[in-house]
């Protein structure tokens, strides 16, 4: 026998849930939060399917978080007249994605590979790329439809932001001590990383204005440095990584694809640490030599060599625009990209 | 498509409107349901819909012939064709790689240098479920338990009915086909009940299994070295909760969706972790599978009618094959074997306790709750522990403990992993690594304690019975809390564990 009063209960439930959603959404907007997309496998897969455009129509970017912050996609698209397909993943090595693109016979476009040495010349940071690639390979019609519906909702509601406003995120912020031998995970403030639908990462204005928030992220990097004390990859492991990169690059080039490496800016102690741990001649120069590919290292170009990253590792949105403008100009000057003729304003640097 | 996806929500709203709010003829509504079910299935992998059609066609045609045929040999040939057709597809897609791998190992063990290419076979979602469902129809025709279905539309809908198509409950022909014979649409009460159950099922799946437990279970079972004893136990407990909330959640959704369309499906779970003993457990866990195995395997093998030894053999055979049904791996066979062993021991103890009580009917394991079997009733024990309810509670806890041992084999990807985990659980290694954070420990402890207590206190009732006696506004608060929890969980649409079976 079915309960008699569920209809009445259901109606009140509907009212309660709608009231809660409205109040919660209003509260978050009042606090200054805005729409940010979940940087999940579905969003990545949506961009991954866009890699098949020719080199005069689109450029594909892979890497770690740095290129996600540093490449200002609207600026790129405005200056080059081409789409920017952002496939970089935070905290991850781009090599599984490079391998995936190399094995994809239909990909023969332009690929910009961003190098963050600690992740790039390493066997770490491959879980997320593997998971996202598997998702893309098995992307069902139902998941594709769900993604479109989700996009519609995410573009309207601030509270639909799993990284920041989900129950598990709130639980992770409880003052619970760290168990010896385990890691509670990094504590990034919401203001540090908003994600656009094009997968660009952006720091919020409040992050730029609040040095405490910047300090919080700097502490996360310091925690990472303590946690991963294994030192840089060397010897045979490094050789095998270089070989794998060369093989992938050769495959793409053999199909008519173009490869460009880029080393985006970092600053302060972060840059000092990277420069010391990964001497340029052993890593960057060797990478370009082995793959016989062009590369843009930020330290080689005065216009992009002296940015001050708010938390040492990523550019602010304003600097990302400046960096992107110069990046396009440098690529043009080197004949690596045939973009629109730009009337470059004098960029403002920090 | 998954119940926990936006696609399904949109699809379901359309289907509900089309089914409940239009005045189309009943056969058109049934056709819409069938078409909707095919779309629902094709949303995963469209070509696999052909397998559903083959299975439907084989059993519809052969079922009719089987019922009408009197010649014993011809009947057996017809049955064989159906079994080969259905089990052949299941065998190829689910067990092809497993068989080839074991064949290769056997060849190599005999000194024959044999290497086979790795088959790249994709497992069609829910194939084990709909194969068993159609098999039950053919076997019913063979044993002439019911009349053959005349309408291809009704039979196709029986095979394909979307709520239970991919992960059960495994429905018998007589439970569903008669419902297709006359118009069924949901009234307000059924719709509200269905939506309430759908919310509850999604809360179990998304809110508890995915959000609170899956990461802890995954990290412990994914560890490549020994973990600490606390981590090992919590990882296994997390999985015990995850598998229940995942699968129980799916069944609850399925029953709810059927209600929304005006149909009813059988219960598949009745608070299994409140079970006292293993026969009780199997009367509460995946009920439609255990009754299927009882009716179409255990009883045809002879059940408990051919002496004690044969009964134990039948019990073990049934549970071993039940284990293999879950997956093409020896770890699932061991899982089934452990449950078979528990059932045999339980039966043995009961037989010793009351040797004259052999009246048990044909059940998978004909046992009554084993009071006295697992709990000492020493007269020296304090009065509190001599209370029957307290003894039963501890018996249920012991059952839960033993069930957890079996989950190690069910979840572990291989025997070395299972072995490492058992060693960690029973303190056979020192310095196992700590991998669960304090927050994970708190989450697992709270959810699992809540689950076990809920199962204990609800073991003789049901959600709908409890809801019957609650104030409407109390139900509303609970219902809204579940929905709000779901909204705030924001877990992405992860697949249900039982889809892979």
Image (spheres, rainbow, N blue to C red):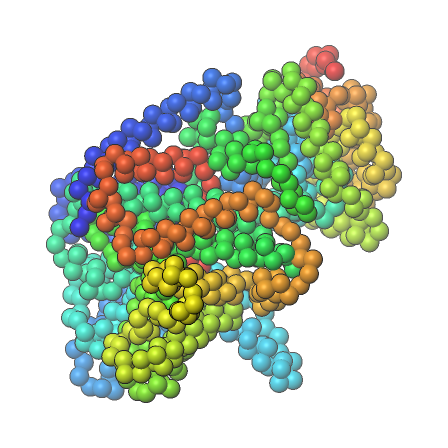
Q: In the picture shown, does residue B315 fall above or below A346?
A: below
Instruction: Tally the numbered discs.
Output: 0
Q: Residue at x 72, y 23 (%)?
A: A309
Instruction: Judge by depth and name the residue closer to the eye, A59 or A57.
Output: A59
Q: Quadrant of residue A176?
A: top right
Q: Position of residue B376 (x, y in %)?
A: 42, 69
Q: Say whether residue B466 is visible.
A: yes
Q: Residue at x 50, y 31 (%)?
A: A165
Q: Residue at x 62, y 38 (%)?
A: A177
Q: Position of residue B344 (x, y in %)?
A: 40, 77
Q: Is residue A251 left or right of residue B207?
A: right
Q: In the picture shown, does residue A12 fall above or below A129?
A: above
Q: Quadrant of residue A264?
A: top right
Q: Say whether residue B39 is visible.
A: no
Q: Is residue A245 left or right of residue B288?
A: right
Q: In the picture shown, does residue A33 fall above or below B359?
A: above
Q: In the picture shown, does residue B74 fall above or below B12?
A: below
Give the quarter of the figure containing the C terminus of chain B: bottom left
Q: Position of residue B456 (x, y in %)?
A: 36, 55
């Amino acid at each position: 026998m079915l309960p008699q009063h569920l209809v009445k209960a259901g109606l009140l439930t509907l009212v309660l849930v709608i009231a809660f959603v409205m109040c919660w959404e209003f509260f978050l907007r009042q606090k200054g939060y805005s729409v940010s997309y979940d940087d999940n496998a579905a969003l990545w897969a949506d961009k991954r399917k866009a890699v098949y455009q020719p080199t005069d129509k689109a450029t594909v970017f892979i890497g770690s978080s740095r290129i996600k912050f540093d490449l200002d996609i609207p600026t790129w698209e405005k200056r080059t007249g081409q789409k920017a397909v952002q496939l970089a993943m935070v905290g991850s090595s781009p090599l599984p994605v490079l391998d995936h693109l190399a094995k994809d016979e239909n990909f023969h476009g332009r690929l910009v590979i961003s190098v963050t040495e600690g992740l790039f010349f390493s066997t770490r940071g491959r879980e997320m790329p593997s998971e996202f690639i598997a998702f893309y390979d098995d992307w069902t019609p139902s998941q594709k439809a769900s993604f479109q519906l989700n996009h519609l909702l995410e573009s309207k509601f601030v509270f639909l932001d799993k990284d920041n406003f989900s129950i598990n995120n709130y639980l992770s912020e409880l003052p619970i001590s760290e168990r010896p031998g385990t890691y509670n995970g990094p504590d990034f403030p919401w203001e540090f990383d908003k994600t656009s639908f094009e997968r660009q990462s952006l720091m919020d204005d409040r992050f730029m204005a609040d040095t405490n928030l910047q300090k919080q992220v700097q502490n996360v990097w310091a925690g990472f440095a303590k946690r991963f004390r294994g030192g840089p990859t060397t010897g045979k492991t490094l050789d095998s990584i270089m070989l794998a990169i060369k093989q992938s690059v050769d495959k793409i080039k053999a199909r008519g694809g173009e490869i460009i490496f880029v080393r985006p800016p970092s600053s302060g102690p972060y840059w000092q640490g990277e420069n010391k741990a990964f001497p340029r001649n052993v890593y960057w120069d060797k990478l370009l030599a082995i793959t016989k590919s062009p590369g843009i290292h930020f330290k080689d170009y005065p216009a992009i060599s002296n940015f001050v990253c708010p938390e040492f590792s990523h550019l602010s949105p304003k600097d990302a625009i400046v960096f992107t403008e110069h990046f396009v100009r440098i690529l043009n000057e080197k004949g690596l990209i045939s973009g629109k003729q730009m009337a470059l304003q004098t960029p403002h640097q920090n | 498509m998954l119940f926990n996806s936006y696609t399904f929500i949109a699809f379901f709203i359309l289907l509900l409107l089309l089914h409940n709010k239009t005045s189309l003829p009943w056969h058109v509504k049934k056709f819409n349901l069938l078409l909707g079910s095919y779309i629902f299935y094709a949303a995963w992998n469209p070509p696999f819909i052909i397998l559903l059609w083959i299975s439907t066609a084989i059993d519809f045609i052969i079922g009719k012939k089987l019922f009408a045929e009197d010649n014993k040999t011809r009947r057996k040939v017809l049955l064989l064709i159906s079994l080969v057709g259905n089990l052949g597809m299941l065998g190829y897609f689910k067990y092809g790689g497993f068989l080839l791998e074991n064949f290769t190992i056997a060849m190599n063990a005999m000194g024959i240098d044999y290497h086979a290419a790795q088959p790249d076979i994709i497992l069609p979602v829910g194939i084990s479920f709909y194969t068993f469902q159609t098999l039950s129809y053919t076997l019913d025709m063979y044993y002439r338990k019911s009349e053959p279905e005349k309408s291809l539309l009704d039979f196709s809908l029986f095979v394909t009915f979307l709520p239970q198509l991919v992960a059960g409950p495994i429905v018998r022909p007589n439970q569903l086909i008669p419902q297709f014979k006359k118009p069924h649409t949901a009234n307000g009460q059924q719709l509200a009940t269905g939506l309430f159950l759908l919310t509850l099922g999604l809360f179990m799946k998304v809110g508890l299994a995915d959000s609170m437990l899956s990461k802890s279970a995954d990290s412990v079972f994914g560890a490549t070295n020994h973990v600490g004893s606390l981590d090992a136990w919590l990882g296994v407990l997390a999985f015990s909760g995850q598998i229940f909330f995942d699968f129980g959640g799916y069944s609850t959704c399925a029953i709810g969706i059927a209600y929304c369309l005006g149909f009813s499906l059988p219960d598949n779970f009745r608070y299994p972790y409140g079970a006292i003993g293993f026969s009780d457990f199997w009367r509460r866990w995946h009920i439609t599978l255990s009754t299927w195995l009882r009716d179409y395997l255990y009883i045809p093998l002879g059940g408990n009618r051919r002496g004690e030894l044969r009964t134990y053999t039948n019990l073990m055979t049934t549970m071993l094959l039940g284990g293999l049904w879950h997956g093409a791996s020896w770890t699932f066979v061991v899982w089934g074997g452990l449950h078979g062993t528990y059932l045999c021991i339980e039966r043995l103890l009961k037989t010793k306790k009351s040797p004259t009580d052999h009246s048990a009917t044909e059940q998978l394991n004909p046992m009554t709750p084993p009071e006295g079997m697992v709990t000492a009733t020493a007269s020296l024990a304090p009065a509190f522990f001599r209370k029957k309810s307290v003894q039963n509670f501890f018996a249920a806890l012991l059952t839960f403990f033993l069930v957890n041992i079996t989950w190690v084999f069910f979840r572990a990807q291989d025997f070395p992993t299972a072995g490492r985990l058992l060693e960690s659980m029973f303190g056979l290694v020192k310095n196992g690594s700590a991998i669960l954070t304090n927050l994970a420990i708190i989450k697992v402890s709270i959810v699992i304690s809540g689950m076990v207590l809920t199962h204990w206190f609800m073991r003789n009732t049901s959600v709908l019975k409890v809801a019957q006696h609650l104030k409407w506004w109390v139900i509303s608060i609970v219902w809204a809390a579940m929905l709000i929890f779901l909204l705030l969980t924001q877990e992405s649409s992860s697949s249900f564990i039982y889809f892979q079976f």
